[in-house]
Image (spheres, rainbow, N blue to C red):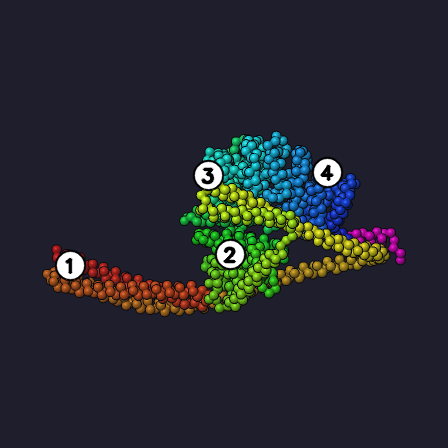
Amino acid sequence: MPPTRSNLEAGGCCVAGLFMIFDKRKRKSITVLFHRMDMTTCLKSLLLAIQQYRDSRTAQNAAQLQKHVEEVSGLRCDQLLSSGQVLPTECVSGLVELIGNPNTNPALTSSIISLLTQLASDNQSREILHSSYNLTSTLAAVIHCYSSTPGEPLVLQSLQVLQKLTYNTRIFQLTNYIHELIAFLMTNIQSQNDDVVMPCLGLMANLCHDNHSVQSYIKSLDNVKPFYRTLINFLAHNSLTVVVFTLSILASLTLNEKVGEKLFDAKNIHQTFQLVFNIIVNGDGTLTRKYSVDLLVDLLKNSKIADYLTRYEHFSACVSQVLGLLHSKDPDSAAKVLELLLAMCSVSGLRSLLCEVVFKPLGPKLRPGGRKQVAGLDGGRKAECGLALLQWLSSPVEGAESCSLHAMQLLNELLKEALGAEIVPDCMLSFVEMLLPTLLGLLKGLDPAQGDVHLRKHCQRITHVTSLLLILCTKDSTRSLVSQQVSAQLCLSQVESLLSCCYSNSPLTCMPPGSDNDLSQVHVEALLKTLELMNKLRQQVKNMETSFYRMLQDQRIGTPLSLALTSHHREHVHTGLSLLFEATPLPDFPVLVLGESIAANNSYRQREAELSVKRVAVQEVAPPRMSTSVLDSSTGSSKSIHNLVGKMQTGLELQDQVKNSHVSEIIDVYEQKLSAFASKESRLEDLLEAKALALSQADRLIAQYRLQRAQAEAETCKLGSLLKDAERRREDLQGELSSQVLEVARCKADMEELLQHNDKLQQDSEEHQALKGAYNTLLNRFNETERLLKELQTAHISLTKQNDVLRKNHEALQLQQDKMVSVMEEREEEIRSLQSDLQKRNSDISGLRAELRTEKEKVKEKDQERRDLEETVDVLRKELNKTEQARKDASIKASSLELQKSQLEAKMKQKEDELNKHSAMIAMIHSLSSGRAKNDVNLSL
């Protein structure tokens, strides 16, 4: 039967539906695949266009290259440089080479710089562009080439990119074109062109920041004093960004000089603090806030300025407003604010003030004149400032992890300061109650399947969290709060996961001890902190002691413990020794595994030391290649220095024979020449190192180019064969598609029947699941009831035994009570007879006194008996202390000693009852003796 039009349309709809289902499932992976294919294709085209333009610098090739550069700029280029692939490396090397060529078209250079700016989106990419591709020197050369026209858009663009590249990056003074760049910046800063002044100030602040060589070079220039005057005039500028750039430059250049002492003296420093805090809170953007924070951090490194800040009267209000910035959702701003607070914690006088601000409600609002307040700052006034820290403390592992680590480090410092006081305030305890659920939530989420990067970050977070919990355990009040929140099961699962991660790194054992960034070291540090926390809380948390000793007897604990004991960190060694002290008495502690691991670590360190010595020897035998002219100059300078030294020695030998008054002046001249030659020699050595580095980089680029060429040829052959296979498969699939269209109609009817049958099976499955759930519920209830029955039976047996013991004790006490009652009756009869005798024999005083003396002797005997009983009680108390000590040492066998403890408590109670009875008897005797004494007194009267 031939297919009709309706059957073909239905079949086509079914095929389209199947393709839509496939598209929904695989859409994400296909999108990523196509993106990679587009990026690879664009990079290959870009590399080809670079080679064509390099061979022939025509306008057509320039336009073609600019088109490819713009196409790559339109794609997503995140983490492209850090991927380590050969194709992006070759493209970026070619683009940087074209930028450095002065014959390149300016429009093309601007497009290339825009692409490189897009590539430098993260810190790692910026570091690669600076160190591997030498982009800083190349852009400095571009600026030097167009220095006559500083207002050129290409110059402004280069200045902005350089400011981005050099932020928090050390620039060597001997880098190519750096001296020319510094001269250009100083010249244009003193100009009146506002468009050029701001980027020049920002770049100059980056070059001077924490860079003594650049600072010394600028101070040695002749025009430095006019430059200082221009900077001081900029302090009155209406732009906050210009002001903070200027303050950063002045702080770097003049902080330890007379100009800086006048600028940052006691009269001006409070105004400077007010200005910097206002810029941080009310700055023009994230860039201004970053430079303001860096400025204040640099000022705090000066002890005198740090002391001024401790006495700044508006410090609490300013810090409150700075903490208000943490309520925003910008991770960059939050990271800089936390960095500032950490720098303040390094000053001892500021830590207590920070604790008052963070752990208590905010103070009165600071109102800087002429500036608008940050939006939303008043809304956070009602809450504590510590809540802002909790916001970033629980940030995800991927993304703003630096903010989370900074927040933990800040809380570490603040909690140490707050808990160092004798009395912990109530506001601190309330903050700890809010902090603990957040910290315990951060311990969860350890998943080895997410990769080593996630594991490293999560283990570092575990280490910081457990460090905070250990700090909270230093005080009894906060330790009780921690023990209420932390469970033994949480710590046990954490240790199990960390041990699994440690042993998943290698099939036999953990990796040998390496650097601090080694993944096994990170795991071991987190594991040690968790075990130390379990050791701190083993007496306060239920089942924590059993879990702690169980983990110490695990056979896998030997290798992490050996890494701790052989570590070069003092804290790790101390923690390992304390855990070893607790684990040594345990019967199943893996001592042999620990010894083997320590021996393996020591042999690994010895082997590494031998290899390092061999490497040093090889480097000394085969030095890197360098130019002959530089070698000749260095050898000539060394020979001249040796000649000068010889002349000085001969001059000193002749000094005793010829008394010449000019010898000291000649020696001073030679010393100056020696220092000049030494500086020249150091500069030549730096040049040698730079040349050797450039030579090695050139060799590496040649090898990469050869490898890329071979890969391109192999890939071309492979693509040709793939194209032929694709054409052949297309023809086969075309024939199969016509047959599949005919089968779709039959499949549609079968699918309807299968769907109906599937509905019936689904209903049966739901009924089965309901019955299964009811059965499981009843089974759980039965198991629970049976367990409760067994517990009640054991409790009934123990209570029966206790009842028998109590009944026997009750009978013994009843007999003693009867005896005492009879004794008391006899005593009462004696008292009545004595009273009658006293009434009858008033005249017989001497006889009564004799009887009184006999009664006193009896009282002394009773006192002796009481002292004997007290000594017995002391002996029993010592036995009780010994029993308590034995219970503490034998906590692992606590279940077997529980009955003995109850028996000792029963004996203790019995002895105390006997003691109370004897005390009552002694009191009664005292009352009797006092009654007789009163009667004697009456008779004597």
Contact, mark 4 vs mark 3 (Cβ under 8 Å): no
Mark 3 lies on residue? 308
Q: Position of residue 82 (x, y in %)?
A: 66, 50
Badge nearest the viewer, 2 or 4: 4
Q: Which mark is residue 309?
A: none
**What is the span of residues highlighted in magenta in the rendered image?**
1-17
Q: Amino acid at mark 4?
A: Ala
Frontmost residue, 20 versus 43? 43
Q: Earlier in the sequence, mark 4 or mark 3?
A: 4
Q: Nearer the viewer, mark 1 or mark 3?
A: 3
Q: Mark on residue 569?
A: 2
Q: Looking at the image, is mark 1 or mark 3 earlier in the sequence?
A: 3
Disc 4 target residue: 107
Of discs 1 and 4, which sits in the foreground?
Answer: 4
Q: Is residue 325 covered in magenta?
A: no
Q: Earlier in the sequence, mark 1 or mark 4?
A: 4
Amino acid type of the residue that numbered disc 1 sits on in the rendered structure: Asp
